[in-house]
Amino acid sequence: MTDFDRKTRSTEAFFGRRKGKPLRDQQVERMHTLLPVLKIDLSATPPADLRHLFPVEVNSIRLESGFGGGEHLVHRARENPTTGFIGIEPFVNSMAKLLAVVEAEGLTNIRVYDDDCVQLLDWLPANSVDHIDLLYPDPWPKKKHWKRRFVSQANLARFHKVLKPGGLFCFASDIDTYVNWTLQHCKRHGGFQWTARNSGDWLTPYHNWPGTRYEAKARREGRSSAYLTFEAI
């Protein structure tokens, strides 16, 4: 068993399995060649300005934790070429899928991290990120597993540390208990102001929203979604 295989079998607190069906040869090749180029190296000293992580000029930084199939991350990177995107996803098959699109389209404003988001958040400088997306995170629906939900006081503190004042934290989910959980935790934290003025604000998808496969599945199963936006204060 290689080091790569050992790593993909390990698990962390906020997510489940690391790997699905075997990767195709081209996917394995990208994981060994392109991933090291795009991956943020946490053994290095973080730059004071995260814009220096990108090979092209960008004027803002947007982070997506758990990008899943990558539909949203790629969509935003295409429409915002002057924004630097940091995509985090520990699931190997999802990372392989994203790398294929990045290579095919020549996207130069995406950097990635393929392990626990907490590790990257702790590495990032304070007040360095303009926007954080947490879209359809694993809801851990059984109450005994709620402690594994990513939204917690500890992780909100991490978000608040890295977000610039006035920066945005966007959370989407189709699970009512997780939506309420997030609202309660953000209120308790005190550093996030919910921007909704009426119910239409949080029931309406974000501007130019591409949708995700998780959202499509929820709709097929009769569940609506909530789209929460919080401003760091």
Image (cartoon, grey):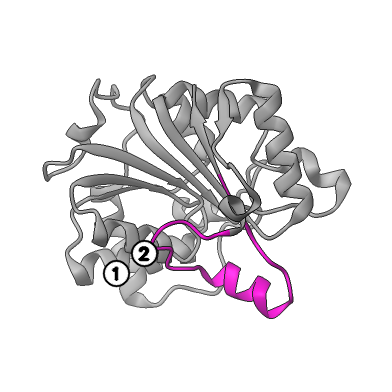
Residue drawn at x 24%, y 54% as measured from the top left: 80
* Distance in Å between CA atoms under marks 2 and 1: 5 Å
Residue drawn at x 65%, y 30% as measured from the top left: 186
In the image, residue 86 lies at what x, y percent? 35, 45
Residue located beneath label 1 in the image: 101
Highlighted range, magenta: 204-228
In the image, residue 129 lies at what x, y percent? 36, 32
- Can you say whether 212 is above or below 67 in the image? below
- Please name the amino acid that badge 1 sits on: Val
Q: Is residue 228 left or right of residue 83?
A: right
The reply to whether residue 8 is visible in this rendering is: yes
- Please name the amino acid that badge 2 sits on: Leu
In the image, residue 228 lies at what x, y percent? 58, 46
Residue located beneath label 2 in the image: 98
Q: Is residue 222 left or right of residue 228?
A: right
Residue drawn at x 56%, y 27% as measured from the top left: 192
Quarter occupied by residue 187: top right
Q: Is residue 98 left or right of residue 183?
A: left
Q: Is residue 192 magenta?
A: no
Label of residue 184 in the image = none
Mark 2: secondary structure: helix
